[in-house]
Image (tube, rainbow, N blue to C red):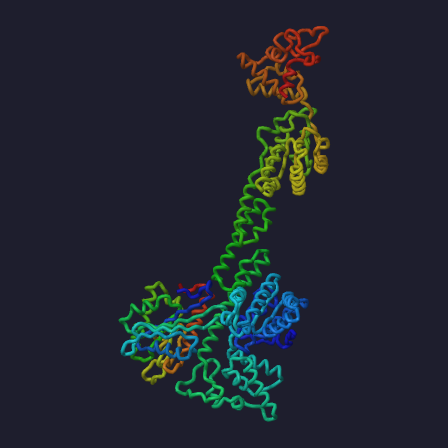
Amino acid sequence: MSLVNFTTREITCKIVYYGPGRSGKTTNLQYIYGRVPEGRRGRMVSLATQSDRTLFFDFLPIDLGSISGFTTRFQLYTVPGQVYYNATRKLVLQGADGVVFVADSQARRYDDNVESLQNLQENLLAQGVDIRQLPLVYQYNKQDLPGDLILNPDELDDALNFRGVRSFGADCLHGQGVFETLKAISELVLQRLAAGSPTA
Amino acid sequence: MTPVLSPQQRFDGFIVGAGSQLAAAAARAVAESPGTAYNPLFLYARPGLGKTHLLMAIGHAARAINPALIVEYVTLDEFVEAFHTAVGAGQGEAYRRRFADADILLLDDVQFVTHRRETQAELLRLVDQMEAVGGQIVLTSDRPPADIEAFDERLLRRVAGGLVVDIAPPDYETRLAILHRKAEERGATFNPGVLEAIASLPLDSVRQLIGALNRIIAFQAAGRAPLDAEQARLVLGVRGTASDVPPPSGVPGAPGKERPPIPGEVTAAPDEFGDFLSEVADTLGRQVEGWRRRVEEAVARWEGQGYRTVRLVGLLERGVDADPAAALAGFVADIERLQALQAEVAALAEDLADDAAFRNPDAIEVAEEALVRAREGASPPPPPESIWAFDDLVESAGNRLALHSARETVAHPGSAYNPFVITGGAGVGKTHLLHGIGNLLQEAPGAVVACLNARDFTDELVEAVERDRVAPWRARYRRVSAFLLDDVQLVAGKERTQEELFLLFNHLVERGAQLVFASSVPPGAIDGFEERLASRLLGGLVVELPAPEREVRQAVIDRLLGARYGKADPELVSYLAGRPAESVRAVQALVQRIDAAAEARHVEPNVALAREVLEGAAPPAPRPAGGPRTSGVTGAGFRSPEKSVLDWPDIGERLIEEWR
């Protein structure tokens, strides 16, 4: 996917929400969906299992209109977090312009976070993408849970964020940190425009 | 009819925020270079965001730069109304001319053109007319051109061909800056936090914002104490405490504290998507502006150095239709290629390096052709022939002056005798001396000596003219350190050759190059030779080579026979040298005849043989008294009295004459 099409004056950003199962990726998209004016958003596609887990992926197109002469569109995707859906994750990850890694802040999910992060790195590498070169932000979701159940953002940074990318504590259910995360990844993605190295 | 530009609506009164950055930059560019930067410029935004302000600011700024500019500002409704009135009064053409003659036409609220086909046709004609004469058009609308209902397709294409920019609602910081500016203009002061409270309201129209400010000012002016932030919010109909008002940075409030909006109140719920949109627009705007600025800088830089920047200007005018980084890199690469070509050409032919082709990165192939021409032209000019060695010339009393001055010329090229002109009859050794000088001059380090016959010079010129290669041909000779032209009398009557020779002469003299000419006729006596050339040749040193004297003839014969037989018979040499000869060439012919006869008879050349060959089979008999002496073809008498030669010296001389 091309980030910038200079001929048609279009910018399309594909942002993928990645993370372990039940970390809140779909919740991110649902919250965003609820805040985007009707005329600006497309139909949110969500394929879920009977137990409401994402089976395939969620897809939310957002039309930001004409910005600086560019018709700007954001396409937000989530991947199924469950370990056995790796083929789908690889598929969704293809052509991503940026990734939001949604970690579950619960201490008991620490290993799942690490495993998912490793999986992200492996899947990107398989596609020839160096995770260090890809716009990436972390979101530590469920920060609203009782303090004794979760790790705080600093602790999660220490544990997961060894690359020092931007990270946000969040409570996606109520929207805290959702748009901050989206803004941060969008900024990183759009800044690549100036660098002249659109993601192929 | 035309509304006057509002004096308040200037650029310095327009607060530029993230959402209006591009529009303001484009408007400034248009005001500074109307008709060239972005034409037409189409600004669109929701009402109250500053379209009209920017439109009028363009008019003010353009007039400030050039007061002679005709600026017309009109809203579409007024445009239509006035047009109908003019047509009704039979003044339609005058009305059209009025707008077509404007340097800048500012047309506000063009969205009202919907379903007005006549007006659209009129507008289309006007746009075409103005663009043809370089007039600037700026249009505003509350929606993008493509969203204007029933908008003429052709008009849409014209508009899309310029620059279409939107103005996004101001973000918090911009709203606050606007409020500060307006408060300052009004001379109003507020308690801390009041303006911030107003800026925090979700009022995304500047007009609404100013309306809110006006309300606060009015309340304060009522005589009560200045309002604080809380009171200000109450005045503006916002209930609740300060903590309910979302902070400007868009940090979401604590979950679960939201309450349903009360109908009629100004809601202060955070517009997270709006904030997001604003930030994206800001980031994208900065990126786009960033490359636009880089392109503009590149235009300024390369134009300043004299290069054509049509490609980059086109990039700016068309908007983004190619990868700007790649386009810039490609342009710079082309410039570097041009510079390399130019440097190579300059080394070959300096005058060709000034060719405009080396300033146009869009036509590199032309520059490459120029290099090819320069290379062709730079092939070495014809050198002097090495067989004509100066030292082979035999000095005698008659040619001593010529040879001495020739040596001086060689010793001080360009300064001793310039030009050095050798005259003399055919075969006296002019060519030998010319080439001999050339060979000596060529020995100097770095010397480039051209030595050729005037006939060849003309032939080359004719070929250069035919192939359109005159410049490289000129360059080929203009870089020489010495130019030697034989048989210069042959350029007589050849106007173009003389013209080129004249130019070359001046160029080389100015450069201090040495010029040497040889002519069988003194320069002043050449018929058909331009006076300006003759005078230049006569301005140097003109020396005459006389017919070879006996000592010269003897030396030449001795050398020729010596070269052929190892040693020359002195008696034969003396005999041959005693024969009359007008030129060295004639002496050479004598020797060749004797040589041929000796070879035919398988004998060494000797005086007897020479006498037989040159004077006849028998020893010269006494001349019969009386009666005509014939040329030897008389036989039984002469065939025709008209063909008889009465005073023919001898057969040898006759043959020499025929040989000539």
Q: Is residue B468 left or right of residue A159?
A: right
Which one is in front, B68 or B561?
B68
Question: Which of the pair B431/B365 is nearer the observer?
Answer: B365
User: Quadrant of the rendered structure where residue B192 is?
Assistant: bottom right
Q: Position of residue B236 (x, y in %)?
A: 53, 88
Question: On screen, B416 above or below A153?
Answer: above
Please state the horizontal and vertical placement of residue B450, each as a whole percent of the image: 60, 36
Taking the image as shown, residue B331 lies to the left or right of residue B657, namely left
Residue furthest out toward the bottom:
B224
Q: Quadrant of residue B640?
A: top right
Q: Is residue A194 above or below residue A102?
A: above
> Is residue B157 visible to us here?
yes
Examine the rendered structure and indicate whether residue B100 appears above or below residue A177.
above
Q: Residue at x 34, y 85 (%)?
A: A146
**Quick check: B380 above or below B369?**
above
Q: Does B277 sit left or right of B463 as displayed?
A: left
- Quadrant of the drawing holding the C terminus of chain B: top right
A83 or A158: nearer the eye? A83
List x then y, in percent, for residue A177. 40, 79
Residue at 58% over, 85% down: B214
Residue B33 in view here: no
- Number of marks in the rendered image: 0
Which of the image's four quarters has the N terminus of chain B?
bottom right
Image location of residue B81, percent across then percent down: 61, 74
